[in-house]
Each structure stands twice: as structure tokens, then as C-alpha cells.
Image: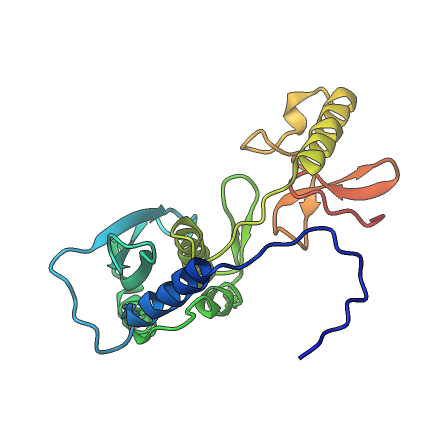
Amino acid sequence: MAHSITKKIISYKVISNEDIAAAEQAQAEAKKIDLESMHENVTRPEVLFGSTYKIKTPQSEHALYITINDMILNMDTEYEERRPYEVFINSKNMEHFQWVLALTRVISAVFRKGGDACFLVDELKSVFDPKGGYFKKGGVFMPSLVAEIGCTIEQHLKKIGMLQTHDLDNHQKQFLEAKRKEFEAIHSDTSTLDESGNFPAKALLCAKCQTKAVVLMDGCMTCLNCGDSKCG
């Protein structure tokens, strides 16, 4: 079959029989690979790799310890991946024992079901406590204890590569650093800072990153944490 060439030829390559054979062999090997994936009937191995996170809220004198255990799928291959398998939450505070136990079992069941379990993060982070939330150290607002559990799971999923981190680029970091220095030059009194010493004590809550870091700069409300600005 003849083909009409309408664009300028900038390079070319003659495909040899060896190239064709190598491509066919690679395709055949790819088909032979039986990739292991997470599903509800997967056998639990004797050893799991886990991480434990500590949560300390102003609502309780006792901390919560969240342990997330992961399975290593397709170990020692180029397709190796780490996926969460189960969650445990422990605390000396027995006030929340009943619903915390139920929550961990449901989350663990979703993890073992397989597929994309990242939706759990948004679902948990959107839970609001009717009695009111609280601020973590650094001015980050948590609408509920369940939401902070969701943030912890989000942190773990980013750690194992299931969720992508969206860090500020160098230009944004330089902009925020310049704004912070400018604000500190105007308000040099350390008494104007919050308990963490990171942001002004009278800063407002940022709707984007949920951190008390919004201040008036150059006639515009600007977040000193994520850079969000009402002026764009």
C-alpha cells in the first residue's frame, strides 16, 4: 500500500529483521508475566511491612497510634509495588474504641478489596465534628478526629507512591520566602507570631490548605503557607 508523505522528513530508520524479532519476543514475555494484584482473596503473608503514625489532639490527653501494614506485590521484579493491606488504631483513651475499631475494619476491607482506594482519603477528610474541630500545631485546621485519620492515611499513601505529592515549585517557594521576610520586617515583634512561631497569631484560615496563615500583603489577602491569593 502506498502512503503519501506530507511532512518534511527529518530522520529515518531501517527496521531490520532482528528488531522485529526482538519486539515480538518482548511482547511475548510481557504476556507471560502473571502480575500479582491486590484482591479480597489474596493470602496474607507471614510478614507485612508497616508504619506507625502518632496523632495527638487537644480533645484528648492520650495520643492515637495508627499502624498501616503493606503488602509487597511482584517482589524483586520491575513491577514491584507496595499496597496497604490493613490498619490498626490504638490508644489508652477507650472513649472512641467502638467506632474506631469499626472504622479500621472497614478501611482494611477496602484495602484488601483492591483497586484504587485513594477515595477513602477524601471521604474521611470531609467528616466534620458537630462539636467543632481543632487546630493542629502549625495552625492546620482539622474538622474532626476522623479527618485527621484521613490525613494520616493520605500521608502514608503518598509515602508508598499511591498518591502524588504536589509540592510548590522553586519560583513559588522563593515568592513565599520573600513575602515572609517582607511581613517579618514590618512586624518584627515576635509576640505577633502564633505558638509554632511560623505564622502571625492573627492570621486567618486559608480555604485552600486549611492553615491559619492568611495575611494582608500589598492590599491583598495572601496565604504564607501555600501562596494562595485573592488577587491571583
Nearer-the-camera pick, 217 or 128: 217
- The image quarter containing residue 216 is top right
Nearer-the-camera pick, 226 or 56: 226
Q: Is residue 219 left or right of residue 23?
A: right
- Residue 229 placement (x, y as % from top left): 78, 47
Q: Is residue 62 visible?
A: no
Q: Residue at x 75, y 30 (%)?
A: 179
- Residue 59 placement (x, y as % from top left): 41, 53
Q: Is residue 152 visible?
A: yes
- The image quarter containing residue 23 is bottom left
Q: Quick one: which residue is furthest to the left in this view?
A: 46
Nearer-the-camera pick, 5 or 129: 5
Q: Is residue 89 left or right of residue 178?
A: left
Nearer-the-camera pick, 73 or 144: 73
User: Is 110 situated above or below 228?
Assistant: below
The number of numbered badges drawn on the structure is 0
Q: Is residue 53 left or right of residue 222?
A: left
- Residue 62 placement (x, y as % from top left): 30, 48
- The image quarter containing residue 25 is bottom left
Q: Residue at x 72, y 24 (%)?
A: 181
Q: Residue at x 66, y 80 (%)?
A: 1
User: Is 214 situated above or below 31?
Assistant: above
Q: Colour mode?
A: rainbow
- Residue 115 placement (x, y as % from top left): 39, 73
